[in-house]
Image (cartoon, helix red, strand yellow):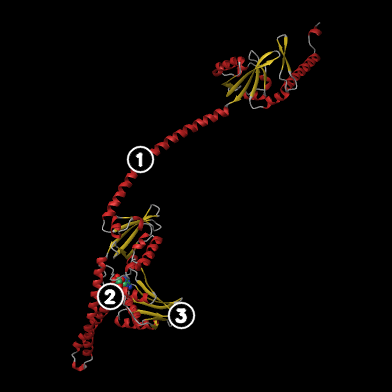
Amino acid sequence: MMETDKLTYEQLLVENDQLRFRLEEANDTIEAIRNGQVDALIVKNGDEHQLYTLKTADQTYRVFIEKMNEGAVTLNRDGVILYSNSRFAAMVDEPLEKVIGLKFNVFVPEISCDKYDEIINNGWDADCKGEMLLSSRDDKLTPCLISCTTLDLDEGTALSLILTDLTIQKEAEWELKVKNDQLEEAQDAAERLNNQLEDTVRARTSDLLISREHFKLLANNIPQMTWTNLPGGEVDFYNQRWFDYTGRRYGETEGWGWQQIVHPDDLQKTIDAYLASLKSGKVFELENRYRRWDNTYRWHLNRAVPLRDDTGEIIFWVGTATDIEEQKKQLDLKDEFIGVASHELKTPLTSLKGYLQLISAYKKEELPPVVKQYVEKASGALNKLQRLVNDLLDVSKIHAGRLEYMLSEVNLGNLVNSSTENAAHIYPEFQFVNTVQGEVLIIGNAERLEQVIMNLINNSVKYSTDDKRIIIKTEVIDDVARVSVTDFGIGLSPEQIDRIFERFYRVEDKKFMASGLGMGLYISAEIIGNHHGKIGVESELGKGATFYFEIPLIKR
Ligand code: ADP
């Protein structure tokens, strides 16, 4: 019966359909188990069928297991996987349906075999945990933590494994280790640095100690009184000489306490100059009187210079007070002498001048021309001498506070005009350019102001070089009258400008030495000061100078 032995094409189709049906059924079963819809599984074992029921037939748990992040498998005694969740299948990179029925150890790499055996063997006895590697189809190794628990199923005991992927944890541990190593290295470096720093600080401290001792030694052994003060002005140190001189203790004159030692007449100007220096950061320099322990006052020259840090900020000031009482006395004596001498010189000079005038007025025909010439020369020299004596007298008067004169309304323009005419007469080789802006009325002393104007013109002539132009301007700016004299001569440096109005100051220039005693500008500044005005100069070395003064206009 060939027909009965051989399967017909139709029979094959039927069989094929049946097989597909069974496959679908099997897939449905697996899906159903996974979703918790069925609780039992029949596994064909040779000719026998074995039934596995899932005793914990709780659908919720199964869903839970299916969704959890750990791999979950159940093994029978032979290590065959009875159940796996999708996460485990993903860990070993196999389709879920292929995983079930395989022996678990196909996913255990050689290196972890012993560990696996140990965990499983222990697991059958009691709950246990252990770490090992899991290998996937493409030999990717995953570090895992395996927790074992036995499960009592109807058909016997099974072993449940929960596998936690430790990759991220291991990476984190590794990163942590690297970071730890780096931290340790940094700590080492910090410690080394700290040690170096400590060494430096120790060295600096000893340097500081030495330099403080140096400072103290120096401060206590110089003849001056010294102090240091903070940027705000408070004195925080005096040398021994200060305490010896004042007879006071530190607490009495520290901070601003020094004010009680200053002569009451000098106090305001001392405070003003001190505050001005603190504000500007410029050297403090001033003469004043300090009270000694025996209540007598002695003149002192004070100087304080600021000490700055790398950024230019002032850290503190170092000040000195030098006793100039003796010099002051000598200076007073000298001034007194100058005063008396110039006064004594004045009388014979006046009579000399009178006699010369008498001679020059003598009948012309009776005087040989050469004598007339001599008389003119003598008059010129006499005028110069008289100016010098007058200046000396003025200086001693200023010093004694006795430079007095009458004040009246003065037309400054007229005064400048006549002075310029006079100058043009005396210095014919110079070219004077004079501009006066209308009527310029002020209150003053015409004679003294003329003295100032002539002094400025004389200087501009004296300190001119090849360029013989002198420009004189009288103008009104806001409510002041301003007279300026410009030359194109040797000019002045900023340092020289700072000092030229001092008494007897002269620029020391070996190349260019003009006659003079350094009194003219000092007297001029005093006169302008008495007129409530201001005197000044704008100049650059080698480029000439413009000297000017300003006096308030009469208010109408
Ligand atoms: P002196 O009698 O020496 O001229 P002054 O008091 O008039 O005394 O001037 C003081 C100093 O100022 C002079 O020695 C000179 O160095 C300087 N000086 C004055 N006027 C001028 C100027 N026009 N150009 C340059 N330097 C001048």
Distance between the alpha carbons at the discs numbered 2 and 1 = 64 Å
**Depth-wise, is mark 2 or mark 1 nearer the camera?**
2
Q: In the figure, is residue 165 to the left or right of 528?
A: right
Mark 3, secondary structure of its residue? loop
Amino acid carrying label 3: it is Lys
Distance between the alpha carbons at the discs numbered 3 and 2 = 34 Å
Dot 1, crowdedness within 10 Å: few (<14), some or many (≥20)? few
Mark 1, secondary structure of its residue? helix
Amino acid carrying label 2: it is Ser
Amino acid carrying label 1: it is Asp
Q: Residue furthest top?
A: 1
Q: Is residue 69 visible to the viewer in this orientation of the structure? A: yes
* Figure label count: 3
- Indicate the quadrant of ligand 1 in the picture: bottom left
What is the x, y in percent for residue 401?
31, 75
Query: Which one is in front, 21 or 385?
Result: 385
The disc label shown at residue 396, or none: 2
Question: Counting residues from the N terminus, which is met first, the one under dot 2 or under dot 1?
Answer: 1
The disc label shown at residue 555, or none: 3
Residue occupying image coordinates x 27% and y 78%: 393
Quadrant for residue 549, please give it: bottom left
Quadrant for residue 421, please give it: bottom left
Quadrant into which the N terminus falls: top right
